[in-house]
Amino acid sequence: MIMLHKVHVVTDANFASDPDRKSQSGFITLFNNNVVSWGSVKQKVVSLSTAQSEYIAVTEGLKSGICFSNMLNEFNLDSSYIELSGDIIASLHLAAHKSNHQNTKHIDIKLHFVRDLVASRSVKLSYVNTKDNISDMPTKILDGSTFRHLKNLIMDEKEEREI
């Protein structure tokens, strides 16, 4: 029996958070519900919408997930797809649907590689509620109770897996 390993990437962005109005991207990559990498990076362009900012964060997070998935393949550990979660439905819609709507023409074409991965079924998209988005940890300044809540979400997943 072949065991498939789960690679899950959770992404978020902090839209126009810096004085220069560049957004902050954040992601957490999990392998079988264990955090294996995380990152936070200032975006190189000024996003014109929350959806664009989140879509850029999706792209950054997915690059990490692909890198980790490729490493698993080198060790002959199969992962059939990468699960990608975000809390902005518009960015997930951009990733899943080919539409050249007037409001999205400003989004750079290089970001649409996410669409190709979704279309080839290498990536599956899912929504995560904003209050439960663990990728807020590397993205935003959090109050103590929010940080503890998100930390507990990660820890609870590990406890459930070990039982």
Image: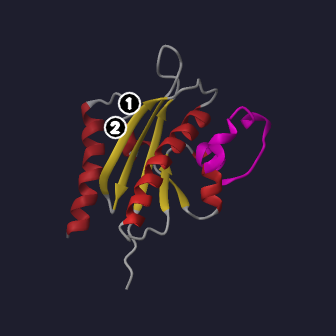
Is the C terminus in the top left, top right, bottom left or bottom right quadrant? bottom left
- Residue for point 49% across, 41% down: 60
Three-letter residue code for mark 2: Met
Three-letter residue code for mark 1: Lys
The dominant secondary structure in magenta is helix
Name the foreground residue: 73 vs 125: 73
Do the residues bearing badges 2 and 1 touch, measured as CB atoms within 8 Å? yes
- Residue for point 43% across, 31% down: 41
Q: Quadrant of residue 107?
A: top right
Name the foreground residue: 43 vs 138: 43
Query: What is the image's colouring?
Result: secondary structure
Disc on res. 137 = 2
Residue 21, image x, y percentages = 53, 18
Mark pair 2, 1: CA separation: 6 Å
Residue 59, image x, y percentages = 54, 43
Relative side of 154 to 19, left or right: left
Residue 103 part of the magenta segment: yes
Relative side of 139 to 156, left or right: right
Disc on res. 42 = none
Name the foreground residue: 143 vs 155: 155
Is the N terminus in the top left, top right, bottom left or bottom right quadrant? bottom left
- Residue for point 30% across, 37% down: 146
- Residue numbers of the magenta segment: 90-113
Write down the residue under mark 1.
140
Q: Does dot 1 land on a helix, a strand or a loop? A: loop
* Residue neighbourhood size for the residue with mark 2, other residues' Cα within 10 Å, grouped as few (<14), some (14–19), many (≥20): many
Q: Quadrant of residue 5?
A: bottom left
Relative vertical location of residue 18 with respect to residue 13 in this rendering, above or below: above
Q: Does dot 2 land on a helix, a strand or a loop? A: loop
Residue 161, image x, y percentages = 26, 66
* Residue neighbourhood size for the residue with mark 1, other residues' Cα within 10 Å, grouped as few (<14), some (14–19), many (≥20): some
